[in-house]
């Protein structure tokens, strides 16, 4: 078990040590090339900070595509002031965003109207954060997001999230899509209150807990 833990620890250490090689590949060797870059904004911020230290700026082809997700507060962490301006100073391509979670089988890409539309096989609900009672599915409402994913056949598709979101149930998004849509001001209840019982799988200590579980099942 100690050997396996050591291997995992070395992998994490190597990831940090390989930053220079990764930046050389991405920012130098890919100059003028078409690049598809996908990174949660938290990782993009760290990448932009490293590029800023080295005086690097993306010079990708104009038809490159950058996809991000997980804005400040949406995973329980707060980004530094000016984070978006920092990212755009290093990666100046137009951005697109996604909203989703590993527990569901579909994600939503932010539409031209600035909203998120989850696929139709994911049924949306809003719950009162204090009582967990369902909120009326009409008008524009804010509450805790709950989902029921109709696609899974080997596990239960319903779950309650830690996300505070606003849904327009009446539809009418300017992008032309029909059905309810999610406003982009998504936050974690854990960022708004200290005693939220639902946390995100990507919280800071999640990796360490995952290692303990994995090693416990192997050893």
Image: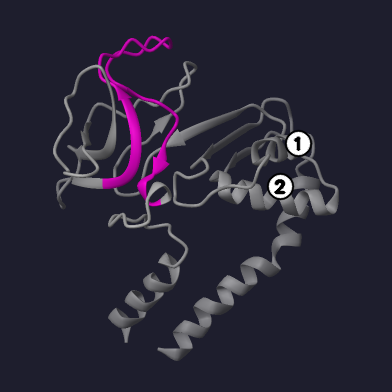
Q: Nearer the viewer, residue 131 or 184?
A: 131
Q: Which residue is mark 1?
A: 89
Judged left or right of residue 164, residue 18 is: right
Judged left or right of residue 37, residue 172 is: left
Instruction: Please identify the quarter of the rendering in which residue 19 is found.
Output: bottom right
Q: Secondary structure at mark 1?
A: helix
Mark seen at residue 158: none
In the rendered image, the quadrant that contains the C terminus is bottom left
Q: Residue at x 21, y 47 (%)?
A: 159
Magenta run includes residue 39: no
Q: How many marks?
A: 2
Residue 32, image x and y in percent? 79, 34
Q: Residue at x 16, y 52 (%)?
A: 155
Magenta run includes residue 185: yes
Q: Residue at x 44, y 68 (%)?
A: 205
Magenta residues span 161-190
In the rendered image, the quadrant that contains the N terminus is bottom left
Q: Earlier in the sequence, mark 1 or mark 2?
A: 2
Q: Which residue is mark 2?
A: 48
Residue 40, image x and y in percent? 53, 45
Q: Residue at x 52, y 84 (%)?
A: 6
Q: Are marks 1 and 2 in contact (CB under 8 Å)?
A: yes
Check disc 1: other Cα within 10 Å, few if <14, some if 14-19, many if 20+.
some
Q: Judge whether 12 appears above or below 144 on screen.
A: below
């Amino acid at each position: 078990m100690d050997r396996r833990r050591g291997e995992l620890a070395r992998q994490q250490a190597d990831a940090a040590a390989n930053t220079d090689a990764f930046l050389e590949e991405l920012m130098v060797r890919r100059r003028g090339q078409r690049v598809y870059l996908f990174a949660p904004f938290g990782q993009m911020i760290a990448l932009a900070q490293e590029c800023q230290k080295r005086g690097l700026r993306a010079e990708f082809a104009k038809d490159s595509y950058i996809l991000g997700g997980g804005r400040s507060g949406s995973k329980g962490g707060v980004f530094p002031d000016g984070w978006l301006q920092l990212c755009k100073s290093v990666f100046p391509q137009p951005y697109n965003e996604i909203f989703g979670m590993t527990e569901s089988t579909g994600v939503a890409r932010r539409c031209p109207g600035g909203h998120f539309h989850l696929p139709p096989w994911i049924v949306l609900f809003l719950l009162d954060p204090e009582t967990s009672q369902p909120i009326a599915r009409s008008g524009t409402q804010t509450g805790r997001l709950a989902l029921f994913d109709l696609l899974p056949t080997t596990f239960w598709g319903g779950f309650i999230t830690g996300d505070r979101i606003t849904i327009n149930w009446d539809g009418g998004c300017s992008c032309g899509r029909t059905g309810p849509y999610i406003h982009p001001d998504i936050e974690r209840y854990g960022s708004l209150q200290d005693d939220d019982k639902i946390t995100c799988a990507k919280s800071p200590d999640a990796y360490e807990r995952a290692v303990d579980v994995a090693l416990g099942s192997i050893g």
